[in-house]
Image: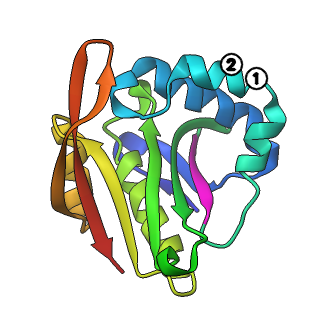
Amino acid sequence: MNQPVNHGLEVTIRKLTPADAEAYRGIRLRSLREHPEAFASDVDESNASLTDIQIFANQLQEREGQFVLGAFIGEGTLTGIAGLFRYDKKKLMHKGMLWGMYVASESRGHSIGRRLVQGVIEEARRVTHLEQIYLCVVSNNHVAKRLYESTGFTSFGREPHAMKLEDCYLDEEHMVLFL
């Protein structure tokens, strides 16, 4: 789906496939490098364990309720990502988790993040028996929290000291959207 966004920037949002593994690896590692406070994954751990591009390709193999959306600009440059993970345990299959949300700094301010979140929600509504999406966001990331709230997510709790980055503890806000 191609749509011009603010300032005439044309953006295409689509599910990533194994053919996108190299670009996905690049933007995922960039997100971890630029914003280590925003993700539970660590760039050093990811670099060490995910040097094999096949691992990224496997992550992009679509399964029911599990996918990664990509935002592409210009000649097909991947500039944003957001994923949905669905639990495979019978008692948890009604829940999915929005994860890995990131838009490259040079592409922010064009509603790309909003389109990615809305795309995840739209795709999630098509998943059989999926009833809710939840996410965690670092409590002091007010821009991200406002984005999630504006797309229908509500906060249901705060986890103190959820992550530790060097000597700094980070609290996380837990949010949910009932489909």
Residue 1 in magenta stretch: no
Q: Is residue 132 above or below residue 61?
A: below
* In the foreground, 93 or 150: 93
What amino acid does circle 2 point to? Answer: Ala
Instruction: Please state the horizontal and vertical placement of residue 60, each as a whole percent of the image.
Output: 72, 51
How many numbered tags mark residues here?
2
Residue 71 colored in magenta in the image = yes
Point out residue 27 in the picture as x, y percentages from the top left corner: 58, 30
Place of residue 13 in the rendered image (x, y in percent of width and height, measured from the top left): 56, 55
Q: CB under 8 Å between callouts 1 and 2? A: yes
Please indicate whether residue 58 sits to the left or right of residue 167 in the image.
Answer: right
Quarter of the rendering containing residue 105: top left
| Magenta range | 66-72
Residue corresponding to mark 1: 51
Q: Is residue 69 left or right of residue 49?
A: left
Please identify the residue farthest to the top as the structure is shown: 167
- Main SS, magenta residues: strand
Instruction: Compare residues 34 and 170 and report the one nearer the observer.
Output: 170
Local SS, label 1: loop
111 shown above or below 140: below
Give the residue type at disc 1: Thr
Please provide percent x and percent y for residue 30. 53, 23
- Judging by the rendered image, the residue that carries numbered circle 2 is 48
